[in-house]
Image (spheres, rainbow, N blue to C red):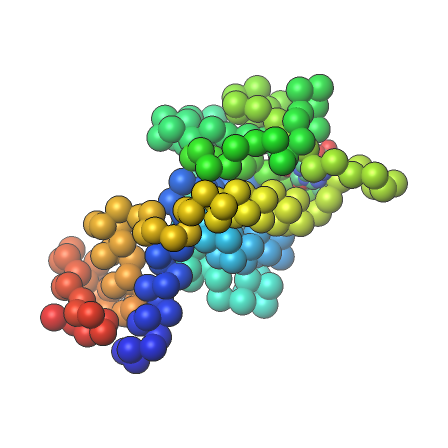
Amino acid sequence: MLERRYQRLQEVLNWRQPDLTVLTEDVHKPHNISAIIRTCDAVGVFEIHSVNFTDELLTYSQVAKGSEKWVHIQTHTEIKTAITYLQQRGFQVYAAHLSDVSIDYRQIDYTRPTGILLGAEKWGVSEEAAELVDGHLIIPMVGMVQSLNVSVAAAVILFEAMRQRQAAGFYDQVRLDPETYQRVIFEWSYPDLAAIYREKGETYPPLGPEGEIL
Ligand code: SAM
């Protein structure tokens, strides 16, 4: 492992935000999922959540540009369990969804643990999900078309979240707990070796200051 590469991996992991996430509800077009993952990587989202009703989650690597390797995807079978999973961990979950109670996305405090629910390309957020979340947000628009592409909506909201978190100093300190950090830096540094350790059910060895295996 080159020292410079290890430093880059550490730098990116140091900026990861474990308490900022997106939850996709039946967003099934691979290029949209891939574009969302790429944006998540760009703003430091550590893990995203996904519920897909129709088919398995596919990404489109030309759009994701390899970012799937750096953003963990947790899939859920039902939207209810996915929303509850986040709420039980202290996340406020906002649906990006037009309704009578929607507020401007800039009014939300993204320095709180936050999950953004994004709806399907054709149908948007389901009624069930809209009722379960803590609130609805909208990106105000003044054009002829009523909605943005889902990945564009994700980007607009996530960059506002990043702006607020940067102002609050969230990217100036490591946000991951030490155990997760050690696990992920090993997996990022030595993915093939990490797979072997996992297969054997063994814990990863510690890494030295230059990323060398101790
Ligand atoms: N016809 C669908 C509907 O009625 O919701 C449009 C779905 S839109 C293409 C896909 C998803 O992108 C939406 O469910 C929402 O999560 C997000 N989205 C698109 N434009 C948005 C906006 N202006 N404000 C908030 N979310 C938006």
Residue 49 left/right relative to 148: left
Residue in the image at 64% along x and 46% along y: 156
For the C terminus, the image quarter is bottom left
Query: Is residue 17 in view?
Result: yes
Tag count in the figure?
Answer: 0
Q: Is residue 101 above or below residue 195?
A: above
The quadrant of the picture showing ligand 1 is: top right
Residue furthest toward the right?
A: 144
Quadrant of the image occupied by residue 6 = bottom left
Residue 81 left/right relative to 214: right
Residue in the image at 41% along x and 46% along y: 170
Residue in the image at 32% along x and 70% along y: 7
Residue in the image at 25% along x and 63% along y: 186
Query: Is residue 81 in view?
Result: no
Quadrant of the image occupied by residue 85 = top left
Q: Is residue 46 above or below residue 133?
A: below
Residue 36 left/right relative to 142: left
Q: Is residue 30 above or below residue 95?
A: below
In the rendered image, residue 200, in percent from the top left (x then y), is placed at 16, 60
In the rendered image, residue 19, in percent from the top left (x then y), is placed at 40, 40
Quadrant of the image occupied by residue 204 = bottom left
In the rendered image, residue 21, in percent from the top left (x then y), is placed at 47, 42
In the rendered image, residue 10, in percent from the top left (x then y), is placed at 32, 64
For the N terminus, the image quarter is bottom left
Q: Is residue 70 above or below residue 213?
A: above
